[in-house]
Image (cartoon, rainbow, N blue to C red):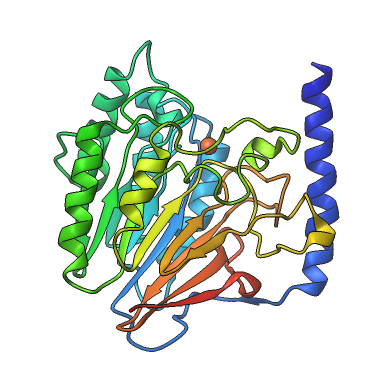
Amino acid sequence: MFLSVFRKFISILFTAVFFFPSLITRRQIAGDMHTAEEDPKLVFAAISDIHLTNDKARAGMLALGLADMQASVRPLDALLLCGDNTDHGYDDQYELLQKTLESYNAAKEIILAEGNHDTWTGDDYAPAKENFIKYNKLICGRDLTQAYYSVEINGYRFICMASEADHTDAYISDAQLMWLDEELAAAAAENKPVFVISHWPLNYSHGLPATWEGKLWEKENLGGLGDQSDAVEEILKAYPNVFLISGHLHVGLSNETHKKLDPFFRYTSIEHDGNFCSVNLPSYMYPAVLGRGLNGQGFVFEVYADKVIIRARSFSAGVWLTNYEETVLIG
Ligand SMILES: [Fe+2]
């Protein structure tokens, strides 16, 4: 009890300390979404960890962002929900998600990826998988046989990974690893960016394990994909132009690695390793202890022939957060 109250106090304190100065020092641009350059080949919004319950206040928070996306001057090709879309994968939570999404025309396509909370439906993984597949059909119009799947939008491949167990970290079967490798091999021949979606980031990326749930004192290997992380990483880094998009950490936006601020900001939301790029999305629903802490945030990916521009946005406020923008060249 005391620990819980203490954590809440620390969370509010950090949010106040780090957010309010940022209003003064960080450049922001408000207004309807315009693309950074003309004629992108693909534009999609990516948010994560909306943790929808049957609470209408949470649905209202999501609706703020959907209204912003709907007002985009260049209609969005896709909206990615990167897992923990529901708090427990229950029917009423998915129904509220469906109803909220249907109330707006946020994007031409919706991509639902599974998160650990979406697997916490029953005593084992089976009912969670059943509901994930059922609501993928109802919300996105896709017929899935597995919770992992790929879709092509405007000629670009989105490969959605999924845990096949109901643990906090992921379980990626050998069959899924083989499928991932085959999907990336097929995409590599096209010399285009390919987007791999995994709710869970790679182990030791984005400041893990210290960034897991703000447990700065945590030393165990927690918060990432788990036991199959090395195998996944080896496959991802064997191919060019791979963008891994994850959530799960509930840390705010950060582009800071300055040691002076260590350990609070010792991670970045966008990481590079050669031409492999890893993007960790903040929690849309929850304010974060670390980084730029307010909720309602995510990224917009604008894909051009030779580059991807990754732009941070507060969808709930309708504001570009230009300090967190990066351009990644394709090659
Ligand atoms: Fe989450």
Residue in the image at 34% along x and 72% along y = 75
Q: Is residue 271 left or right of residue 9?
A: left
**Image mark count:** 0
Most foreground residue, 169 or 309: 169
The image quarter containing residue 222 is top right
Residue in the image at 42% along x and 40% along y = 229
Q: Which quadrant is home to the C terminus?
A: bottom left
Rendered position, 52 above or below 291:
above
Give the image location of residue 215, x and y in percent: 71, 35
Q: Is residue 42 left or right of residue 18?
A: left
Most foreground residue, 235 or 69: 235
Give the image location of residue 236, x and y in percent: 34, 54
Residue reaching furthest to the bottom = 38
Q: Which quadrant is home to the N terminus?
A: top right
Rendered position, 85 above or below 81:
above
Residue in the image at 79% along x and 31% along y = 7
Give the image location of residue 223, x and y in percent: 55, 36
- Observer able to see residue 103: no
The image quarter containing residue 304 is bottom left
Most foreground residue, 45 or 254: 254
Residue in the image at 81% along x and 47% along y = 14
- Observer able to see residue 221: yes
Give the image location of residue 269, x and y in percent: 58, 58
The image quarter containing residue 29 is bottom right
Most foreground residue, 68 or 240: 240
Rendered position, 245 above or below 22:
above
